[in-house]
Amino acid sequence: TMDPVHNMICLPSLCKDIIDTPEFQRLRDLTQLGATSYVFDGGVHSRFEHSIGAAHLAQTFATGLRDRQPHLGISQKDVVCVTVAALCHDLGHGPFSHTWESCVLPSMGIHHHEHEQVSLKLL
């Protein structure tokens, strides 16, 4: 995958399977930066792009640890698990997520809603 920040990103095939799901594809329609694009024209980053970038960075970090510190016993399976966790960390976000969680939902009498829990349910 080509990325405007990280250039070429190569993720494990399991990640590609997850990316192809409707649950992950919906992240294309969720802005990472809220209403920032109304103030800064370049602030047009989606949670989809953010999640792929996070997976890339997590994979790079975990691979670096594995290669530079073999005494830790980090396996390739561990690297894939860390990569998938980073890829999926925002699955439960909704529109204007943190504002939605902290302002809108409480005004509707809904408390203790956290996007992390929704992410777990989607998985």
Image: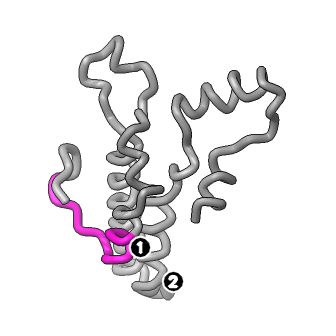
Nearest the eye: 43 or 93:
93
> Where 26 sits versus 24, above or below?
above
Q: Residue at x 52, y 33 (%)?
A: 95
Query: What percent of the width, then of the height, locates residue 10?
Result: 23, 68
Q: CA distance from mark 1 to mark 2?
A: 8 Å
55 sits left or right of 108 in the view: left
The colour scheme applied to this rendered structure is: one colour
| Mark toward the start of the polypeptide (1 vs 2) | 1
CB atoms of marks 1 and 2 within 8 Å: yes
Q: Residue at x 47, y 56 (%)?
A: 23
Query: What percent of the width, then of the height, locates residue 118?
Result: 65, 52
**Amino acid on which disc 1 is placed:** Leu
Say which element carries label 2. Answer: helix
Say which element carries label 1. Answer: helix
Query: What percent of the width, then of the height, locates residue 31?
Result: 41, 33
**Amino acid on which disc 2 is placed:** Leu
Q: Quadrant for residue 101, please give it.
A: top right
Magenta-tinted stretch: 7-17
> Where 102 sits versus 87, above or below?
above
Number of the label disc, if any, that sits on residue 65: 1
Number of the label disc, if any, that sits on residue 72: 2
Query: What percent of the width, then of the height, locates residue 75?
Result: 45, 87
